[in-house]
Amino acid sequence: MPVKVICENRRARHEYHIMETYEAGIVLQGTEVKSLRAGRASLQDSFARVENGEVWLYNMHISPYEQGNRYNHDPKRPRKLLLHKREIMYLWGRTREKGLTLIPLRCYFKDGRAKVELALAKGKKLYDRRADLAERAARREMERALKRRI
């Protein structure tokens, strides 16, 4: 199964504790697919929400297709995500808990279909982020020391 990654939300792993991930299909209009194939999308500041038994993705920016003329789409329109009913009901229950939210991690093509990797996540506090940065710096320093020793 070849997977072609279109865009990633790199800040998500820095700002959230990722608890679970899900793969969801995404409902697109014609020119949106062409823009995605050209790699013109961004997941920055995007989030998902369960409403009326459906999952919607908000603030995902897909640039208008240059040759799309009047058939172009609104770049930040809400897009419906495709999940199994059982998954949707589970996510609806979990997002009602305090502090849990749905964040898209990356958008990609899998077997010719556009997919979004959705994460059930909990926001990190500032001290959690600082601890992660300190831990990463310490690990890097240890690797450097080991390299010098060898």
Image: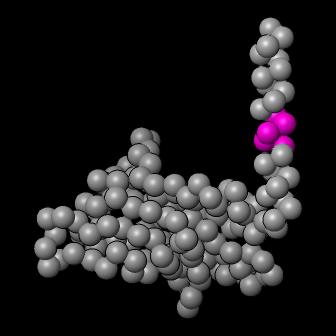
Q: Quadrant of the N terminus?
A: top left
Q: Is residue 121 left or right of residue 75?
A: right
**Can you name the residue that lies furthest to the bottom here?**
52
Which image quarter: residue 89?
bottom right
Q: Nearer the viewer, residue 77 or 145?
A: 145
Q: Nearer the viewer, residue 109 or 132?
A: 132
Residue at the (82%, 34%) spot, across then down: 139
Q: Where residue 109 sits in the image (x, y, percent)?
A: 40, 52
Q: Where residue 61 sits in the image (x, y, percent)?
A: 41, 70
Q: Is residue 80 visible?
A: no
Judge whether 37 appears above or below 55 on screen: above
Which image quarter: residue 85?
bottom right
Q: Is residue 8 visible?
A: yes
Q: Is residue 51 left or right of residue 146?
A: left
Q: Where residue 66 sits in the image (x, y, percent)?
A: 18, 64
Main SS of the magenta part reads helix
Residue at the (45%, 71%) spot, across then down: 60
Judge whether 143 appears above or below 40 on screen: above
Residue extent of the magenta highlight: 135-139
Q: Quadrant of the C terminus?
A: top right
Q: Where residue 88 sits in the image (x, y, percent)?
A: 61, 77
